Image (spheres, grey):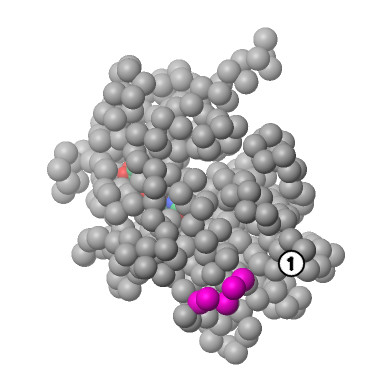
Amino acid sequence: MKKKILVTGGCGYIGSHTVVALIENNFEVLIIDDLSNSNKDVIDRIKIITGVKPKLLEVDLKDGFLCDNMFCYHKNIDAVIHFAAHKAVSESVEKPLKYYHNNLYALINTLMAMEKYNISNFIFSSSATVYGNPETLPLTEDNKTQRPFSSYGNTKKIAEEIIEDVINSNSNLSAISLRYFNPIGAHESGHIGELPNGIPNNLMPYITQTAAGVRDRLMVFGNDYPTKDGTPIRDYIHVVDLAEAHVIALKRLLNHNQETPFEIFNLGTGNGYSVLDILNTFEKIIGKKINYTITDRRLGDVPQLYADINLAKEKLGWIAKRDLENMIDSAWKWEQNIRSEQNEIMN
Ligand code: WQD
């Protein structure tokens, strides 16, 4: 009997890649998504890759009644992987209530339904932004998390505290929180990738859309940071490496191999690249220049974030396998595919 996994936000960028990895590992997947930053055609794309079309429920998890109904109706869920959240750091600085409302209501409603219907395995999509502006690098999981600069990061920090409180209340909840650094790239098939609605907030989709002529030029948000070339440094990680880590963490939960009921792991490569590193590598790979302008800093950005990867390596036996060239190459392949698909539809 296949284990049944509920994936909230499963039509999103990281969610869809994780759904593919789950299906390829013989799990049955049920997706919940409000499609606020994703498209339902992802379900068909997942079928092209895996041969399986996962069931999609269009549910806004902020609605406690709908959320409870969904869990009540769909029995025998063995675990929940919770991606559903808004995730644009800069937007969250301008619209904190949108982020606290969406990200925390969705989490709390999901945890309440899990408690009511006796679902005890939970994987939480967290973020390196919980570390705020770190004093020491690379970042280990026990690094004191400061007050994140953005309400996005704070929703992730508060969420981890909520999960910990629930676990400490003698519930039967077991959870693993995965702190992503900067996910980029796309599935090798070119059928799924990052496709945010509207103007991209993140660096890589903005670069690929500029290269594809969808955007006029890239704005580089500040080159006066205390880094080697003045632009911020991040730990970019291939989204498929990230997806594979979720399957490993899920099996750890289902096989009761956890050492404590709540475990936290960094998911990064341990390598830091600046914005200009990414830009220069991209130009080298695609063989053409990208228009860009240096502008002011963006609210919420910190100078450097990159991971100490030893805990996930030691406890999960996981390490990122794909290098920066593969990340960028796959992102560009996806951009070209999606643009040619859209041109075919328009012609
Ligand atoms: C990266 C760098 C920008 C866009 C991300 C996700 C967040 C979370 C943490 C998972 C920064 C610069 C960007 C642009 C630019 N991930 N930049 N011009 O802010 O590190 O946050 O990782 O939970 O969800 O958003 O990523 O890609 O937005 O920015 O110069 O048009 O690129 O200043 O230094 P960030 P990002």
Residue 81: quarter of image: bottom right
In percent of width and height, residue 76 lies at 78, 68
* Residue under the point 60% across and 89% down: 170
* Residue under the point 52% across and 29% down: 334
| Residue assigned mark 1 | 77
In percent of width and height, residue 109 lies at 67, 69
* Residue under the point 59% across and 49% down: 21
Residue 276 left/right relative to 249: left
Of helix, strand and loop, which one carries label 1? loop
Q: Is residue 256 magenta?
A: yes
* Residue under the point 67% across and 41% down: 50
In percent of width and height, residue 268 lies at 37, 54
Amino acid under disc 1 = Ile
**The residue stretch that appears in magenta:** 254-258
Quick one: which residue is furthest to the right in this view?
A: 73
- Any part of residue 154 in sight: no
In percent of width and height, residue 92 lies at 46, 52
Residue nearer the viewer, 325 or 213: 325
Q: Is residue 114 above or below residue 318?
A: below
Quick one: which residue is furthest to the bottom in this view?
A: 170
Residue 172: quarter of image: bottom right
Q: Is residue 224 magenta?
A: no
Residue 157: quarter of image: bottom left
